[in-house]
Image (cartoon, rainbow, N blue to C red):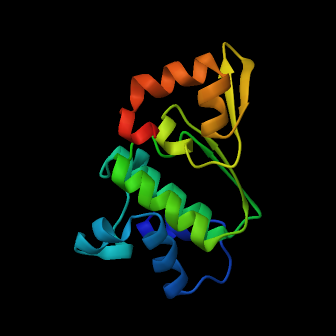
Amino acid sequence: GTIRSNITYGAHDISEEEIWKAADIAQATEFISRLPEGLDTPISQGGTNVSGGQKQRLSIARALAKKPEIYIFDDSFSALDFKTDATLRAQLKEITTATMIIVAQRISTVVDAEQIIVLDEGKIAGKGTHEQLMKTCDVYREIALSQLSEEELA
């Protein structure tokens, strides 16, 4: 299909403005706008004509276009650079009251979450906010120290 059909898949009666809003929040507007056919640009089988980060942004835009009550992002931000990840999460927080479950391996993706559940070999190793886990969960603290600078952890 096209970028448009990928974003609107499963969303009913969605306007052009709502498509662009979903794309904007998903941080996809810039790359879509640069394409000669914009929203009507064909996507090859398997998405071989878009990067991993672009695929993730289109998938996120598709989820936003549906306006569900619960979002489950299973490693959906992993191919995004840190700035795009942070901007996207900030916009999501602003525009929705829906429940968001984010599965991530990057601490920076979950650092502002209301509750973080740390898994270690399939078992819960800790639960709480970033600040709480830094004090109480060795597994979380070890991961955080390996991924973030002292300034980012403060």
Residue drawn at the location 67% of the way across and 27% of the way down: 118
| Residue 10 showing in the rendered view | yes
Above or below for 128 versus 24 = above
On the image, the x and y values in percent for residue 2 come to 42, 66
Most foreground residue, 109 or 40: 109
Query: In the rendered view of the protein, which quadrant contains the N terminus?
Result: bottom left
Q: Quadrant of residue 151?
A: top left
| Residue 44 showing in the rendered view | no
Quick check: 107 left or right of 96?
left
Residue drawn at the location 60% of the way across and 38% of the way down: 130
On the image, the x and y values in percent for residue 103 come to 61, 38
Residue drawn at the location 50% of the way across and 87% of the way down: 17
Quick check: 71 left or right of 111?
right
On the image, the x and y values in percent for residue 105 come to 52, 31
Quick check: 6 left or right of 29?
right
Above or below for 48 versus 68 = above
Most foreground residue, 48 or 28: 28
Residue drawn at the location 54% of the way across and 39% of the way down: 75
On the image, the x and y values in percent for residue 125 come to 71, 19
Q: Residue furthest top?
A: 121
